[in-house]
Image (cartoon, rainbow, N blue to C red):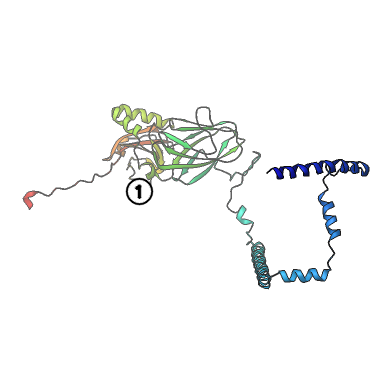
Amino acid sequence: MKGFKLKTLAGTVVLASIIPVIAQESEVNGSNPLFSIPSLEAARQNHNNSVPQTTNSSTEVTTRTLVDPMLEKLKTKQDEDKLKAEIEKLKLENKRLKDRQGVERQEIPSVPASVLTENVPKYNVSGAEMPMTMGSTDNDIMVKPGVNQIVQIAVGHTNRIVTPFAHPQVSSASLTGGEQGEVTVKDNVVYVSTAKNYPLSMFITEKGNENLSISLTLVPRKIPSREINVSFRDSNVSMRYASEDAEAWEKSQPFLSGSNKNLRTIALQGIPAGYNLTNLPKDYALPKCRVDGFKVDFSQGQLIAGSKLHYVIGKVTNVSKQTLEFKESGCGDYDVAAVALYPINIFEPGESAEIYVIKHAQGRLEIKQVRASVLDK
């Protein structure tokens, strides 16, 4: 241990004696090897200078000898598979492009121009002069349940639509309802006031009963306000259901006073609340009136149907050459409840008046179940 230390110490003494010499030489050469580390590039250049250069032929031989022929075949096969996959992908894409071009080139069948004009109602959005065929101008229109009817209304004014329903309700996607809206319902009347200048559609039904509906298309035009009376073309339709208001009225009023009130309303061209105005059905049992000197005609008559009572309206004309008084008893029948005339009942030759015959409505036949007697067993 002591010798080692002495040896180490001796080495240290020798190194210490060499350092001043190196430092002195570095000051002369302008560099200090103890404080400057040569760069990697310099070391590489020194190595290249010291190692003799080999020829290209020897390098190629060395590289070839290092590559395994099996690996080289495997890589070649992988490259071929990759190329085949790319080719299949390109073929598939090409087929898709051809199919797409075939669809784009397919011709769409032409449609004749008459499809857009034939049986299509025309209307003028500007509200200018329009053909009279655009919508009905009649104040009284007959409709079928669910069949659309085109009518004209006044734009910017209030229009009144009198319906056969006691409590009508309106369904429309183009009109707003409510007290301040474009549609207001009061009793059996629908009021429409709109500033729109294109056709509007609505369905009118009885509140709580969606079986029957009135379909209307309203065409606004620059005309005065209109009142439109709507009734069903088929009288049997209106008689399918009994109005609750009409039934309540007929039960709450004595027959004489109630009939007089209804007749007064009808004579003034009104319709009692809860009653339905229709044309007379073809198979309806008309009243039989036989009065000398008079012609009673119900061919153009009307029917105001209630729950238990029907008001049949016809026309009476004096066909004689003298003044005559019409005898209401000449229209008596088993189902006739009362007869009245307006505005006169004493006629000059050729004069006419309306006749109102109140008939008892035939109720539905009740289906009764029959019980077999035990005595018959």
Measuring 28% from the left and 40% from the top, which residue is drawn there? Answer: 335
Measuring 75% from the left and 68% from the top, which residue is drawn there? Answer: 63
Q: Is residue 315 visible?
A: no
Reply above or below: 64 against 156: below
Front in this rendered view, residue 25 or 162: 25
Report the residue marked by disc 1: 283
Query: Which amino acid lies under the numbered mark 1 shown in the image of this protein?
Result: Asp
Reply above or below: 293 against 80: above
In the orientation shown, which residue stands out farthest toward the left?
375
Front in this rendered view, residue 265 or 124: 124
Viewed as shown, does residue 59 lie left or right of 276? right
- Count of numbered marks: 1
Give residue 367's position: percent from left, percent from top: 23, 46
Give residue 246's position: percent from left, percent from top: 34, 33
Give residue 122's position: percent from left, percent from top: 61, 46
Quadrant in the rendering for residue 291: top left
Quadrant in the rendering for residue 82: bottom right
Quarter in which the N terminus is drawn: top right
Give residue 294's position: percent from left, percent from top: 37, 40
Measuring 44% from the left and 42% from the top, which residue is drawn there? Answer: 213
Q: Residues within 10 Å of mark 1 (few under 14, many from 20)?
A: few
In the orientation shown, which residue stands out farthest toward the right?
28
Front in this rendered view, residue 299 or 228: 228
Q: Is residue 179 visible?
A: yes
Q: Secondary structure at mark 1?
A: loop
